[in-house]
Amino acid sequence: MSHPSNFILERFSVNDLAGPSALEVEQHIRACDGCTQFLAQLEAARKARLAAVPAAQFVEQVSARRARVVRLVDHRIARLGAAAMTVLAAAAAILLFVRRPDHGPLGGVTLKGSGVAVHRNRGGDVHALASDETIRGGDALRIVITQSRPTRVAAWVVDVQGRIDRVVEEGSIALPSGESALPGSLVVDSPCIDLELVVLFGVESFQDAERRLKEAIPDGAIPEGTGWGLPGALTRRLRCE
Amino acid sequence: MSDPPVRLTKEEVAEAYGRYGHLVLRRCSRILRRDDAAEDALQEVFVRLWRYGDAFRAAESKVAWLYRVADRCCFDVLARDRTRREVPFDETGAELVSEGSDRRAIEDREIVLMFLSRFDDRVKEVAVLHYLDGLTQEEIAAATGWSRQTVVKKLAFLADRAEKLRAALLSTSGAP
């Protein structure tokens, strides 16, 4: 056989090739100094890497990064200043109230002043996301809640594959009346996939709410409009470009 | 009703890092050409591995899955860098064009990777599969799901751009 590609050799080096292909590559390597040398370089790189950053240390770094991403985005948005955020929140809340019938799951249900706005930070450009605007990988999203009385609020994002992520790591959070941003921000993964934001007001039992939400997600699809199993929840579809 | 996706445990992430981490880092380094950025991208890849552990488990080739994620992470970094600062020719080309360089000394691969951020993501993907992984047209078509004709066009585009960038680099450096 001719020289395997780098990709094939890299896969071979970590036993990622299926039987017949691996045998073929193995036979080639026995007679090829160049490929043998390449594999030796890869193994040396593996050992050097693990010596420099052992697995346990790396996992801690990644674990910390998962939490840090949220806070980093927070600080960036915070720099815009409270005044700007208030104006944006007000504008977004107005937009939401006007457009709620377009994307709310509850149709004619009166929500007594509860509202959800999504602020998108894209390369430093922050504004409230209109219903016809889209998201893409790398966007940071901040969720701003408006409610007429203090309650506990929980929020989740659900992707089209049915994965559920909490917006508030602790589950739910007590918020005052008026406008409040949920702590942290969501960073849209790349490649982007459509998301559904689900916000529940007046949470009494977070565990129960999350269980009902999980039960309401059908296989591989976000339900359109209804069927979330959370009476009183607001949902908002966040579509990718 | 299917169960919610199960994420990897810390032990599984550690095992994946021990086995594949050096390959992912190597790839990120070659795409981004900056050690700090590559290290950052490596962590981001494993954040996503943690999150999408079920997809990783199901992947026929773990390396291919990780490389796809790594490519996306690196392309995002390149896009952000490009938004912040457009690097001029004479600066980016300095390490390629030294005294005594000739046209042939500057391989297409080096030029394409050096200027990867200038291409759109589909072209970037073809560039990485061809110039880094050494895949053939057919293999690229199979990996991306695009037609072979599309792949051929993009490779021709890359070769053409490499030639023009090479000419621009050489004229900037004053090389013959």
Image (cartoon, coloured by chain):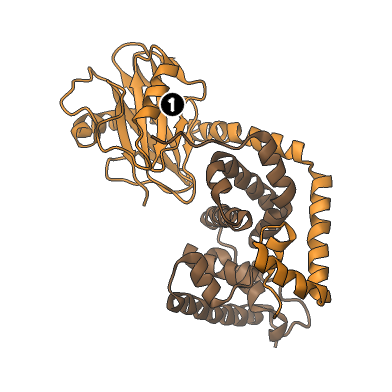
* Residue at x-position 53% and y-position 65%: B125
* Residue at x-position 63% and y-position 78%: B108
The residue wearing badge 1 is A82
Mark 1: amino acid: Ala
Quarter where residue B129 is shown:
bottom right
Spot the residue most to the bottom.
B176
Whether A138 is drawn above or below A19: the answer is above
State which chain is coloured orange: A
Q: How many marks?
A: 1
Quarter where residue B98 is shown:
bottom right
Q: Whole-percent x and y of residue A6?
A: 69, 69
Q: Whole-percent x and y of residue A191?
A: 47, 51
Taking the image as shown, residue A222 lies to the left or right of residue B74, namely left
Quadrant of the drawing holding the N terminus of chain B: top left
> Mark 1: which secondary structure?
helix
Whether B68 is drawn above or below B124: the answer is above
Q: Choose between B2 and A148: the one closer to the eye.
A: B2
Quarter where residue B44 is shown:
top right
Whether A234 is drawn above or below A102: the answer is above
Q: Whole-percent x and y of residue A161?
A: 41, 43
Taking the image as shown, residue A171 lies to the left or right of residue A129, namely right
* Residue at x-position 41% and y-position 47%: A193
Name the chain under label 1: A
Q: Choose between A225 and A134: the one closer to the eye.
A: A225
Residue A144 at least partly seen: no
* Residue at x-position 76% and y-position 73%: A27
Q: Choose between A24 and A39: the one closer to the eye.
A: A24
User: Chain B hue?
Assistant: brown
- Disc 1 crowd rating (10 Å Cα; few below 14, some 14-19, many 20+) is few
